[in-house]
Amino acid sequence: MVAGFSLGEIAGLAVSGILRREDAFRLVTVRGRLMQTAAEQVKGKMAAVLRMDKDELEALCKEAGVYPVNYNCPGQIVVSGSEEKMDAFTEILGAGKVRFVNLPVGGAFHTPYMESASLGLEKELSEGGYEFSDTERILYSDLTALPYPAGKEDKIRTISKQVSGSVRWEDIIGKMAEEGVDTFIECGPGNTLSGFVKRTLKDVRIFNVSDRESLKNTLEGLK
């Protein structure tokens, strides 16, 4: 099974066999341009909110006009929105002694402010000559926390709406575990996603592959 966090889902499309690798690379560049253009229309911010009840946080977001967008793991949800509303929102958090960390990003990603990027991706995927295949491996969607759909149009819709929808990472990891997954391998620099898995599940094996040495250690650990 495969899952990718936000941009990582495009790598997942290639690894799972849904897209050819050259098409996935082309899609990354288009996605980046579209999201940058959308981010320039409205100044946005994102902040990771720590150890706040999910229902209470979602209710507060609704009142403040901001969006809970990345459900990373128990006790950590990233909130995104316009700069003005996020400043007011974090003031409320501070007054309530709720811990949060401002993220070094340049836009209100995974919110309705990215709708123009979603529409641009849908057009690109529909008209750009991309080839879609059935999955060789199950790929979970950030948007739905479910395996990718079978039909071409449904795949296009799932990919394009991801940039303006929430990343349901905690749900994805939980569903993988329900399907019997007990070993997780994070590919790429850092170990952020491994940390999310550790906070979500117990009694699972977690490996990181970021260079030749860590690849060797992972292969040894999997024997």
Image: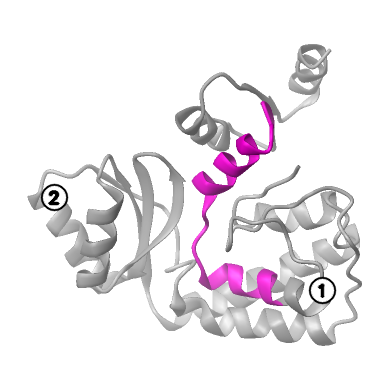
Which secondary structure lies at badge 2?
helix
- What secondary structure is the stretch in magenta mostly built from? helix
What's the amino acid at mark 1? Gly
Q: Which residue is mark 1?
A: 151
Is label 1 or label 2 in front?
A: 1
Could you tell me which residue is drawn at 80 percent across and 84 percent down?
126
Based on the displayed image, in which of its 4 quarters is residue 86 positioned? Answer: bottom left
Based on the displayed image, in which of its 4 quarters is residue 70 positioned? Answer: bottom left
Could you tell me which residue is drawn at 70 percent across and 56 percent down?
147
Which secondary structure lies at badge 1?
loop
Q: Which residues are magenta?
A: 157-184
User: Label for residue 110?
Assistant: none
Q: Position of residue 191 (x, y in %)?
A: 57, 31
In the shown orientation, is residue 222 left or right of residue 121? Answer: right
In the shown orientation, is residue 75 left or right of residue 124? Answer: left
Q: Position of residue 137 (x, y in %)?
A: 84, 47
Q: Which residue is mark 2?
A: 94
Q: Position of residue 157 (x, y in %)?
A: 68, 77
Pointer 1 with pointer 2, Cβ within 8 A: no
